[in-house]
Image (spheres, rainbow, N blue to C red):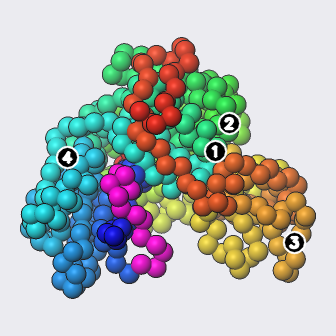
């Protein structure tokens, strides 16, 4: 009897890559591989799903590959594959620098991986296959979901923007929109499996519909998700300020299961820098969007991305960013020091900012956002929050006697389950990831909320049952649907028949 080969996927980068890795896992398991048990020193197949956005992405990949060289020498049957954005960019360079790699595939042909591995095994030579355009929409591929309670659903791939700092469009290609019926069929299939939270993914979600000529398609999609039974939370990432319209704000406010959380990338508060970035909006428009969101949803938690030290950024430009941050009152921000991305226009610009200047500005921005986050979180003290219990969000939970999860607005909540080793409330017993609890916030910290009072309510869920049983959703590809949102989409048959932010 042939022993089942094991695999491991190591993921770098954005949510789009995380979701692609779920598809890689689904493909390999359909091909007969099994996930490597925890603690396995070296699986039979190791796949790197790479990111090319950061300056040190190359070093990180080749460092990891170098660490595997002795294992490959000791066991020639070990197979190593590299996919993702860096593979799309470097192509054959990967096997030149690391000739012990067996397979290289790009962002457009994830589905080729099992075949490439088999070919490499048969020919005893590296197989490199990079396509210039999307071979098939990733939704047609089987997917092994990593969570019982939340799931990613791609609504589009690629990007039509030309931001000067971003390499993603050249690696992911032009935007390709998925048919609404396909999206809703996948969301419904997840809800039927017990998944209670779905995040809609795209490089620029609010241009969804450009391919079939409906500028209001994204708002309609959000409203249609509101009609799916069992789906409790809908999120999306990331929109672009240029295309963010009032109909989307209305859909968020009026659809009960769409969460009042919004990731709106600012990048810079300086109009000059925004122009140099080709961001096609200005700070006044950005602030207007924030104001409109808060008028419709006063409880909305808004997060953002900011780049410090873009080429040519002056102290005056940086001060403009600080002013927009102060006015926007973000609940949190992903802040980055600008680094040159080879192949981007910004990488060729003059007046690159000295590292020490970027570092000093970065520290000032961090200090400002920490203060704002803390002030905003303190406002929630004393309020009841509904928390979806999660896995891995509380590194100190074992020490503190707490569990962790996410409030509806996306904030991280650490809530008490034990106190001096004793249960503090009977109905807290047996809380599982995927269950939903209600508790009162006792302290707002800069990066999370603490709830140390007794849990007031626990709702056991199908997702919690699945977690307890060790069952994760494993869906075949979804390929059904028509490009309309005004009617109920076609059901999927029983046999199954994103990255740099905008």
Residue 94: quadrant of the picture: bottom left
Q: Residues within 10 Å of mark 1 (few under 14, many from 20)?
A: many
* Distance Cα–Cα, label 2 vs label 4: 46 Å
Q: Nearer the viewer, mark 1 or mark 4?
A: 1
Q: Position of residue 392 (x, y in %)?
A: 59, 66
Q: Earlier in the sequence, mark 1 or mark 2?
A: 1
Q: To which residue does mark 1 refer?
A: 194
Q: To which residue does mark 4 refer?
A: 345
* Distance Cα–Cα, label 1 vs label 4: 45 Å
Q: To which residue does mark 3 refer?
A: 423
Residue 80: quadrant of the picture: bottom left
The reply to whether callout 1 and callout 2 are in contact (CB within 8 Å) is yes
Q: Nearer the viewer, mark 3 or mark 4?
A: 3
Q: Position of residue 343 (x, y in %)?
A: 17, 51
Name the quadrant of the C terminus.
Answer: top left
**Front in this rendered view, residue 116 or 268:** 116
Report the span colored magenta.
Answer: 27-40
Q: Earlier in the sequence, mark 2 or mark 4?
A: 2
The residue lying at 26 percent from left, 78 percent from top is: 68
**Label 2: which secondary element:** loop
């Amino acid at each position: 009897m042939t022993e089942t080969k094991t695999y491991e996927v190591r993921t770098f980068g954005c949510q789009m890559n995380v979701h692609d890795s779920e598809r890689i896992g689904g493909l390999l398991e359909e091909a007969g591989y099994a996930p490597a048990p925890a603690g396995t020193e070296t699986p039979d197949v190791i796949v790197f799903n790479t990111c090319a956005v950061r300056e040190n992405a190359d070093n990180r990949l080749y460092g990891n590959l170098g660490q595997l060289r002795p294992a490959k020498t000791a066991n020639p049957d070990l197979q190593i594959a590299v996919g993702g954005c860096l593979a799309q960019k470097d192509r054959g360079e990967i096997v030149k620098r690391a000739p012990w790699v067996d397979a290289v595939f790009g962002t457009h042909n994830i589905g080729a991986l099992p075949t490439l591995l088999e070919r490499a095994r048969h020919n005893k030579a590296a197989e490199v296959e990079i396509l210039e355009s999307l071979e098939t929409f990733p939704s047609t591929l089987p997917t092994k979901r990593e969570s019982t309670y939340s799931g990613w659903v791609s609504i589009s791939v690629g990007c039509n923007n030309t931001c000067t700092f971003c390499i993603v469009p050249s690696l992911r290609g032009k935007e390709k929109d998925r048919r609404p019926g396909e999206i809703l069929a996948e969301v419904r299939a997840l809800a039927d499996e017990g998944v209670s939270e779905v995040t809609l993914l795209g490089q620029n979600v609010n241009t969804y519909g450009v391919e079939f000529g409906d500028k209001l398609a994204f708002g309609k999609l959000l409203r249609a998700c509101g009609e799916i039974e069992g789906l409790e939370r809908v999120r999306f990432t990331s929109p672009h300020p240029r295309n963010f319209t009032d109909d989307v704000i209305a859909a968020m406010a009026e659809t009960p299961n769409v969460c009042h959380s919004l990731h709106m990338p600012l990048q810079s508060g300086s109009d000059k820098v925004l122009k140099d970035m080709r961001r096609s909006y200005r700070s006044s428009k950005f602030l207007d969007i924030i104001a409109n969101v808060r008028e419709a949803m006063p409880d909305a938690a808004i997060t953002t991305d900011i780049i410090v030290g873009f080429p040519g950024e002056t102290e005056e430009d940086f001060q403009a960013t600080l002013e927009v941050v102060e006015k926007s009152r973000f609940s949190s921000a992903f802040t980055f020091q600008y680094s040159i991305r080879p192949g981007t226009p910004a990488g060729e610009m003059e007046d690159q900012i000295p590292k020490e200047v970027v570092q000093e500005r970065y520290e000032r921005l961090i200090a400002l956002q920490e203060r704002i986050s803390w002030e905003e979180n303190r406002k929630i003290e004393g309020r009841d929050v509904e928390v979806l219990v999660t896995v891995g969000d509380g590194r100190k939970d074992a020490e503190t006697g707490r569990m962790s999860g996410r409030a509806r607005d996306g904030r991280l909540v650490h809530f008490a389950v034990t106190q001096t080793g004793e249960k503090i409330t009977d109905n807290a017993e047996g809380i599982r990831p995927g269950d939903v609890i209600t508790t009162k916030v006792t302290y707002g910290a800069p990066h999370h909320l603490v709830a140390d009072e007794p849990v007031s309510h626990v709702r056991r869920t199908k997702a919690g049952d699945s977690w307890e049983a060790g069952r994760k959703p494993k869906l075949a590809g979804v390929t059904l649907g028509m490009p309309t949102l005004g009617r109920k989409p076609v059901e999927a048959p029983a046999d199954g028949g994103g990255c740099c932010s905008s």
